[in-house]
Image: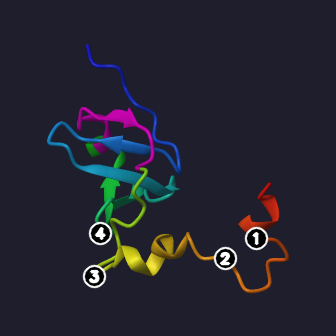
Amino acid sequence: MVEEIIPVVGNWYQTPNQQKFEVVAIDDDEGVLEIQYFSGELDELEFDTWANLGLVNIPAPEDWTGPFDEFEYDDLGYTDMNRRPDDLPISLDDFED
């Protein structure tokens, strides 16, 4: 018997065919879950469908850029990490012997 996974808003899940998604809303009145796949696509699942998917809980992806098309890693500013802001009052020269 497969253990039923309870949907929780903000938690991530994976289907047997490796699709990863987050539950973004639960609508008890309509009997549906609103989900967002890692790619950014939104979808709805009925409660009955959820119970039959064979899901597993997974941690949130470390790479949060999945839903963004044409995303350049340079846009994150990580390539500029070696630069010292102009208004920083100290520099590495302050630590020389």
Contact check, label 4 and label 1, Cβ < 8 Å: no
Question: Local crowd at mark 1 within 10 Å, few (<14), some, or many (≥20)?
Answer: few
Q: Residue at x 46, y 41 (%)?
A: 7
Of callouts 4 and 1, the N-terminal one? 4
Of callouts 2 and 4, the N-terminal one? 4
Of callouts 2 and 1, the N-terminal one? 2
> Secondary structure beneath disc 1?
loop
- Please identify the quarter of the rendering in which residue 53 is found: top left
**Residue interval drawn in magenta:** 50-61
Residue to which mark 2 is pinned: 84
- Cα separation between marks 2 and 4: 38 Å
* Image vertical order of residue 4 relative to residue 27, above or below: above
Contact check, label 2 and label 1, Cβ < 8 Å: yes
Q: Position of residue 19 (x, y in %)?
A: 22, 49
> Secondary structure beneath disc 2?
loop
| Residue 58 is a magenta residue | yes
> Secondary structure beneath disc 3?
loop
- Cα separation between marks 2 and 1: 8 Å
Amino acid type, mark 3:
Glu
Residue to which mark 3 is pinned: 70
The label nearer to you, 2 versus 4, is 2
Residue to which mark 1 is pinned: 91
